[in-house]
Amino acid sequence: MMDVLFLADFSVIRPDPGLILWTSVIFILVWGILGRMAFRPIQNALKKRENDIQDSLDEAKRAREDMANLKAENEQLLIEAREERAKILKEAKEVKDTIIEEAKQKAKEEAQKIVTNAKQEIENQKMAAVTEVKNQMGNMAIEIAEKVLRKDLTGDKDQEAFVGRLVDEFKLN
């Protein structure tokens, strides 16, 4: 019955001072053990995780900045490459135009030289032909005169016929 009495006398609202003492001692011991064994490692792990996350964020920020710098450098290099390409193309066009102009000038000069040489050659051939015709005419005149002098002619008509025959002979030659 005592047990029943003890239970009847127990009240949750009014705890016993011994129970409060032992509950407080046990709570402080458990809290101390948990603080050393569990809370401190958890707190260290959380700080380490926080530091790792911050380092990762800083690294990502640096990587972003590096990528932005690389992008700016690439854009600058691309602009410079385009300018260089335009400059090279312009120089190539100028060289092409110069070469074409020089070739046209040389072709004109060569054509002029050929025309001048051809005119000179024609003139020389013409002079040679005229000289040869004159020489043949002179030779023909000399031969006619020689033959006329050698023949003993009796009349003027015979002499004219003979000269006409000789001229016809030379025309055939």
Image (spheres, rainbow, N blue to C red):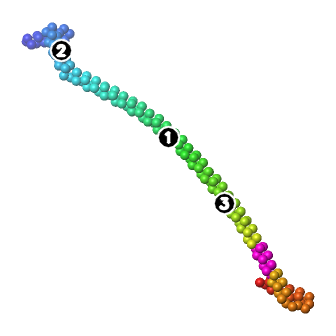
- Any mark on residue 78, and which? 1
Q: Is residue 12 above or below residue 102?
A: above
Is any part of residue 134 visible from this angle? yes
Query: For the residues carrying marks 2 and 1, which lies nearer the camera in this image?
Result: 1
Q: Quadrant of residue 31?
A: top left
Q: Earlier in the sequence, mark 3 or mark 1?
A: 1
Give the amino acid type for the residue marked by disc 2 in the picture. Ile
What span is colored magenta in the figure?
129-140
Quadrant of the snapshot with the N terminus: top left
Is residue 111 placed above or below 133 in the rendered structure? above
The quadrant in which the C terminus is found is: bottom right
Circle nearer the viewer, 3 or 1: 3
Distance in Å between CA atoms under marks 2 and 1:
71 Å
Left or right: 160, with 27 as reference point = right
Q: CA distance from mark 2 to mark 3?
A: 117 Å
Compare residues 150 and 18 and report the one nearer the observer. 150
Checking the image for residue 110, the label placed there is: 3
**Above-or-below relation of 53 to 126:** above
Between disc 2 and disc 1, whose residue precedes? 2
- Three-letter code for the amino acid on which mark 1 is drawn: Leu
Q: Residue at x 31, y 26 (%)?
A: 51
Query: Upstream in the sequence, badge 2 or badge 3?
Result: 2
Q: Nearer the viewer, residue 133 or 62?
A: 133
- Amino acid tagged 3: Glu
Residue position marked by numbered label 2 in the rendering = 28
Badge 2 marks a residue whose secondary structure is helix
| Real-space CA distance between mark 3 and mark 1, rounded to the nearest whole angstrom | 47 Å
**Residue for point 92% across, 88% down:** 156
The x and y percentages for residue 87 are: 56, 44
Q: Was residue 109 drawn as part of the magenta stretch in this picture?
A: no
